[in-house]
Amino acid sequence: MYKEHIKKLREELSKSGLNFFIVTNMRNCLYLTGFTGSEGVVLVTPTLVYLIVDFRYLEQAQNETKNVKILKREKALHLLLADVLKKYKNGKIAFDSDSVTFKQHKEIKKSLLQNRLVPTFNVVEGLRAVKYSDEIASIEKAVRISDEVFKHILGLVKHGMSEVDIAEEIEYMVKRKGASCIGFDTIVLSGKRSSLPHGTPSQNLLKDGIVLLDFGCVFSGYNSDMTRTIFLGKATEKQKEIYNIVLEAQQIAIESVMPGVKASCIDKAARDYIVDRAYGEYFGHSTGHGVGLDVHELPAVSHRSEDILQSGMVFTVEPGIYIPEWGGIRIEDMVQVTDDGCKVITRSSKEMIEIQ
């Protein structure tokens, strides 16, 4: 897998006449080499891939990578890069403008006077947007874990529990089920607090009404992300109305997923339906985001997105309606773009759930 990732990167660089690439984003380092450490630098040349790590990660790097030349970092990064690249005079060296710091750029530029540093944007991230089969398998496993945890939580939620109680149980169970960690800070919100799209769980005790759960986990480096909104006691007529609007908007958006379609069209499909039902002002975030090594990555599924859907892309579809001092409802699934449409990866039921 990693050899194929490097091959694709070299092909992408060659289109711009670039020969070398300095990678400091650790998710991109993982994508290109398999190294899971929290600090390191990858240097891609036309013939070799270098992984630069300090003593702490040397053994780990040796165990986790293949077809990579590992360099022990015993001097400043810019000096080590200069040593490696001194034989490549006048070569163009690309770097990710999002992750190389100003200080690093200044030092590297000073050490590589014979080379031209070329800023790039989202080169590796663009490659990461289209998943290989083994990447999708890891994502599916992470999603299955989340599905199992949601089922467990449904048998546990009751009046008198706090939002924090449920969040902690979710985070405990994803590890019990085989995940390495949670993918992001778990969201559990109840009652009026559910109108906060990314609110933090509180000590508030659950009462009759809305309970919104948004959580994910990581398996073999790949993330899952799901949201379900359930009800303690009987849902009110307005709660039922808004739940069904969100569910229908999500379904319309999912049905519009096809290779070659603009990601912005998926957002528009969900948004137009909610606007037509007079709740447009209460849907203020994008309809979805790519999921992979990061829980938020390409493609962007928003009205501003210029991304075009391709087979192998994986992203969320998560419309929501959030009314201050009333509450919020969101439903989120992960989908995979296929050759002729899409596959919904999340399996948890979306039927309205009322817990008595």
Image (cartoon, rainbow, N blue to C red):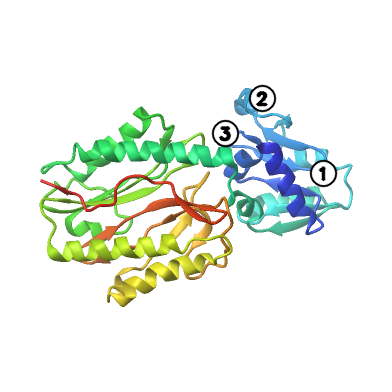
Type of amino acid under label 2: Gln
Kindly report the distance in space between the C-alpha atoms of the residues bearing marks 3 and 1: 24 Å
Up/down of 303 relative to 315, above or below: below
For label 3, the crowd category at 10 Å Cα-Cα, with few meaning under 14, some 14 to 19 and many 20 or more, is: some
In what element is the residue under mark 1? loop
Question: Do the residues under discs 2 and 1 have CB atoms within 8 angstroms?
Answer: no
Up/down of 286 relative to 171, above or below: below
Which of pointers 3 and 1 lies earlier in the amino acid sequence? 3
x%, y% of residue 78? 74, 43
Type of amino acid under label 1: Pro
Type of amino acid under label 3: Thr
Horizontal placement of 244 versus 206: left or right? right
Kindly report the distance in space between the C-alpha atoms of the residues bearing marks 2 and 3: 11 Å
x%, y% of residue 311? 58, 53
Q: Quadrant of residue 253?
A: bottom left
Q: Which residue is mark 2?
A: 62
Q: Which residue is mark 1?
A: 46
Q: Nearer the viewer, residue 70 or 311?
A: 311
Q: Which residue is mark 3?
A: 36
